[in-house]
Amino acid sequence: MHGRPLRPNLRGLTLWIEGEPEHPPLVLDWREAEQVRYLMWILDMTFKSFRLPEFPPISDYCPEGRTGDFFTALLVAWCRSSHSGRAADVDPDLLGAARAYAEETDDALRWAPEPELGIPEFKLTPGAGWLIRPEEIRAALDKERSSPKPLTDVLDQPGGLPRKQWFEFVDYLGFGATLFGVRVC
């Protein structure tokens, strides 16, 4: 099932190689991100999925009346180094609950509905933190390589994505597929 690519807002995309914090991110502004999503749609690299993972209910982890403290603990759990100074101010039990919630949430963000079909469009949503898994990337890149649709119809056209930028994006995905995937922020 295909339709026009998702356009949730006018934010761009920042892609990170999962597990490689020293590797520079690939940053696309909103126009470039939209063009990349469109090209991926044309080449059947993406698909619509109406199934989403189950995210853990925050109420299972956050004690009633301690929402503010819980979100501080969650910041410490998610951003270990940048908020390490605040760790001493957080109740250890609350920090443990926040870490458990963060792990459960990350598991949901790693979920892949049908990796053999390529990349689900919702994983190209800016700011969500989805992980595009290596098997999803490999399936998408296989489709890009075997597509009968000529890229020349879209690349290097006035207002279109420059060829060099498309191949940088494809190479970045390919590198992520050799490791742990690509995180979309």
Image (cartoon, rainbow, N blue to C red):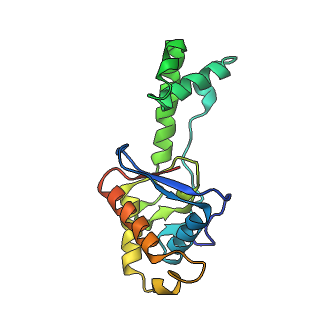
Residue that appears at 50% across and 32% down: 102
Q: Is residue 91 visible?
A: no
| Residue 37 position within the rendered picture, expressed as x and y whole percent measured from the top left | 55, 67
Q: Is residue 167 left or right of residue 61?
A: left
Whether residue 114 sits left or right of residue 67 in the image: it is: left
Query: Splitting the image into 4 quarters, where does residue 90 fall?
Result: top right
* 15 versus 56 height, above or below: below
Q: Position of residue 36 (x, y in %)?
A: 53, 69
Name the residue at 55% across, 27% down: 74
Which sits in the foreground, 36 or 144? 36
Q: Is residue 75 visible?
A: yes
Residue farthest to the left?
Answer: 178
Q: Name the image quarter holding residue 30.
A: bottom right
* Left or right: 164, with 20 as reference point: right
Residue 88 placement (x, y as % from top left):
49, 13
**In this picture, is 83 found above or below 27?**
above
* Residue 65 place in picture, x, y as percent: 70, 17
Total count of labels: 0
**Where the N terminus falls, by quadrant?**
bottom right
**Image vertical order of residue 101 relative to residue 158, above or below:** above
Q: Residue shown at 68%/58% (left/top)?
A: 9
